[in-house]
Amino acid sequence: MSASAAARVDVRAYACPMTYVKAKIALDRLAAGERLEVWLAAGEPLENLPRSAAEDGHRVIAVEPLAGEPGAFRVLVEKGAGTAPEWP
Amino acid sequence: MDDDRIGRYARQLLVPGFGEEAQARLGRARVRVVGADAVASAGLVFLVQAGVGRLWIEDAEDVAPADASGWLFAPSSVGTPRVDAASAVLAPLSRFVSVERYPTGGVPSATLVFASSVPQALASAESARRAGIPHVVVEPDADGGALVVVPPGAPCYACARSTTGIGRPAQPGIAALSALAAQELVLMIANPGSVPGRRIDLVRGVATARPTSRLAGCACGSTAGADEAAGPA
């Protein structure tokens, strides 16, 4: 885990939507402003996870190859302030 | 939460504001459903699919031919106890949900009422109110009707119920009202405090919600939550 991340989740073995679901659960456990490091595979997970995180109000800090792990990437996400939705 | 459950409930875990803890609350819930006729069918399936931990069905009647015109009860189930027929269909839908006949003395943590009479609806709602648990009461009317949503401490069902008596016989579109009632209950269980006391009228497919208000002198104003301290664990 990088020094700037409060938690890390490895979803390289999972497919969508499990990749973002597991990341979302990990983000739910963090305080706003804390960072989550996600290890994920190239392809669909790498395309979807940063986008989903941004859509949920989080900030994607970095997307970069995971050192020493061909085909894997590291995404650093900072948890947004977030607001509970108002149900209809 | 283990991967099996995360996989099962992945789609709703993605809903903003509906996370791991909300799903866990649902998994711990013991939901009593009063009435299991055709009107209740969609609501029962909704509760199972949402992942309530324990579904207690209370119904003393057998499956009637009219029930079998819906999609929960097969024609071959006509004449068998509704609870048994419903359980046989619902239980295989999820291995994470226990579907059972309501046990005598069972202490639910939420109640959904599809009563067949006004007195039964009032009695079931009052029991839930006195226990301090969230409940929803459904008033079917043809292919619509109304439902009264009662979180703990809100104006009771008697304050917001229809005063015109039993509605017209249910028609197939009633599934929308049934599912809407189950959704309201799920929201109250998953995110306590997120749903206010309200009445939703579904007329010609259009849902209209308005806050409920307490009738002057109603006992729920003086004893709301009176039994809450001794309520369900």
Image (cartoon, rainbow, N blue to C red):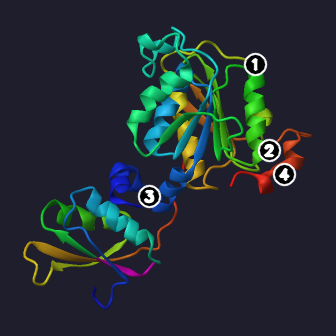
Q: Quadrant of the N terminus of chain B?
A: bottom left
Q: Are marks 3 and 1 in contact (CB under 8 Å)?
A: no
Numbered badge on residue B16: 3
Image point (33%, 84%), residue name: A5
Furthest residue to the bottom? A3
Q: Which residues are magenta?
A: A32-37
| Residue B19 percent across, percent down from the top left | 45, 60
Q: Can marks 2 and 3 be said to lie on one chain?
A: yes
In 3D space, how far apart are the residues under numbered discs 2 and 3 (Cα atoms)? 32 Å
- As helix, strand or loop, the secondary structure at mark 3 comes to loop
In 3D space, how far apart are the residues under numbered discs 3 and 1 (Cα atoms)? 39 Å
B52 sits left or right of A51 in the view: right
The residue that mark 2 highlights is B130
In 3D space, how far apart are the residues under numbered discs 4 and 3 (Cα atoms)? 34 Å
- As helix, strand or loop, the secondary structure at mark 4 comes to loop
The residue that mark 4 highlights is B226
Mark 2 or mark 3: whose residue is earlier in sequence? 3
